């Protein structure tokens, strides 16, 4: 049986505006030796029938990433406050923050905290001001970018990765920074919880001050009695990764998950429980 063969796949874009249908593109896979493959693309222009051959991955598609991702809003994390009101994160790809180099490169748009309407027929209310985006990049995957208690939300801002505090009673309230400005996203925070006993915010921090590639991860706390920007205090450290800090109802104990290189959390992780001292 001969080893050489040619397989042709033809792709016809459908249900798109006429401006997105200039070409019919064919993918040609040529197997000319055992374990040696070459994939080329051949584009035929409708006007001249000119055949253009280009290496795989370099052909110009009329369907761009912006066209695919920018059409729809996405729904993310949800929360319910003490009054039973629903909040959620809404991603808006077309609302890009041009001042953020990350958003410029990734075309990520904004992530907005939205409050459900209080009356039937009313529109949802944006809580996050236009110059902010609720998103963390802690441990690359992100998640756990905000927490609501009472009439306050604490969230990570995508541009600088600082923690901010904001009232959720009014859409006109301005977020107040809680953590220092390091001149860039050198510290990220995620999955925080409120500690009512000591009136503080307990959260996971990923610190890249000393090593950008191998960040130091700890569980830290911020005193909410202070109205000034403050450096978080470390509660737990020493391992490579931490997640899910949770307090008991009395605020006497805290549980968390931790793991270390080379493990992933689903391979080998540990559940720890620690007691707070009288001074926290």
Image (cartoon, helix red, strand yellow):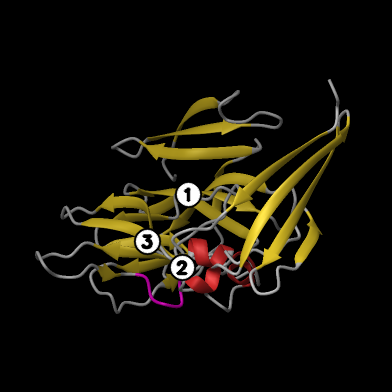
Q: Is residue 169 visible?
A: yes
- Which numbered circle lies on residue 143? 1
Image height check: is 42 above or below 125?
Answer: above
| Residue 277 quadrant | top left
- Which residue shows up at 41% across the image and 41% down it? 278
Nearer the observer, 165 or 74: 74
Disc 3, SS: strand
- Which numbered circle lies on residue 133? 2
Residue 144: % across, % down: 44, 49
Nearer the observer, 19 or 168: 19
Residue 270 shown left or right of residue 144 in the figure: right
* Residue identifier under label 3: 90
Residue 115 shown left or right of residue 49 in the figure: left
- Which residue shows up at 28% across the image and 37% down it? 249
Image height check: is 172 above or below 56?
Answer: below
Residue 140 shown left or right of residue 222 in the figure: right
Q: Magenta span has 158?
A: no
In the rendered image, which quarter contains the C terminus?
Answer: top left
Q: Nearer the viewer, mark 3 or mark 2?
A: 3
Q: Earlier in the sequence, mark 3 or mark 2?
A: 3
Q: Badges 1 and 2: C-beta atoms under 8 Å apart? A: no
Residue 268: % across, % down: 60, 23
Q: Earlier in the sequence, mark 1 or mark 2?
A: 2
Label 1 to label 2: alpha-carbon separation = 13 Å
Label 3 to label 1: alpha-carbon separation = 13 Å
In the rendered image, which quarter contains the N terminus?
Answer: top right
Q: Is residue 277 visible?
A: no
Q: Badges 3 and 2: C-beta atoms under 8 Å apart? A: no
Q: Badges 3 and 1: C-beta atoms under 8 Å apart? A: no
Q: Please give the range of residues in magenta.
A: 128-133
């Amino acid at each position: 049986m001969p080893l050489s063969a040619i397989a042709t796949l033809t792709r016809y874009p459908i249900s798109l505006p006429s401006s997105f249908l200039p070409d019919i593109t064919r993918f040609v896979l040529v197997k000319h030796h055992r374990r040696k493959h070459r994939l080329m693309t051949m584009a035929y222009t409708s006007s001249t029938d000119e055949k253009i051959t280009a290496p795989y991955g370099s052909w110009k598609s009329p369907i761009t990433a912006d066209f695919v991702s920018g059409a729809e809003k996405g729904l993310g994390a949800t929360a319910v406050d003490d009054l039973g009101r629903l909040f959620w994160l809404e991603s808006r790809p077309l609302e890009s923050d041009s001042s953020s180099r990350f958003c410029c490169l990734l075309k990520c748009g904004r992530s907005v905290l939205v409050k459900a309407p209080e009356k039937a027929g009313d529109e949802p209310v944006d809580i996050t001001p236009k110059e902010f985006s609720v998103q963390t990049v802690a441990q690359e995957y992100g998640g756990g970018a905000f927490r609501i208690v009472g009439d306050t939300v604490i969230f990570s801002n995508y541009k600088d990765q600082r923690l901010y505090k904001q009232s959720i009673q009014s859409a006109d309230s301005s977020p107040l920074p809680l953590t220092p400005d390091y001149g860039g996203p050198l510290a990220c925070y995620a999955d925080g919880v409120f500690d009512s006993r000591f009136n503080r915010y307990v959260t996971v921090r990923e610190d890249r001050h000393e090593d950008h590639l191998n960040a130091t991860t700890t569980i830290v706390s911020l005193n909410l009695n202070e109205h000034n920007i403050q450096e978080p205090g470390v509660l737990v450290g020493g391992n490579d990764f931490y997640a899910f800090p949770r307090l008991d109802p009395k605020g006497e104990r805290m549980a968390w998950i931790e793991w270390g290189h080379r493990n992933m959390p689903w391979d080998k992780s540990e559940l720890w429980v620690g007691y707070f001292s009288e001074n926290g």
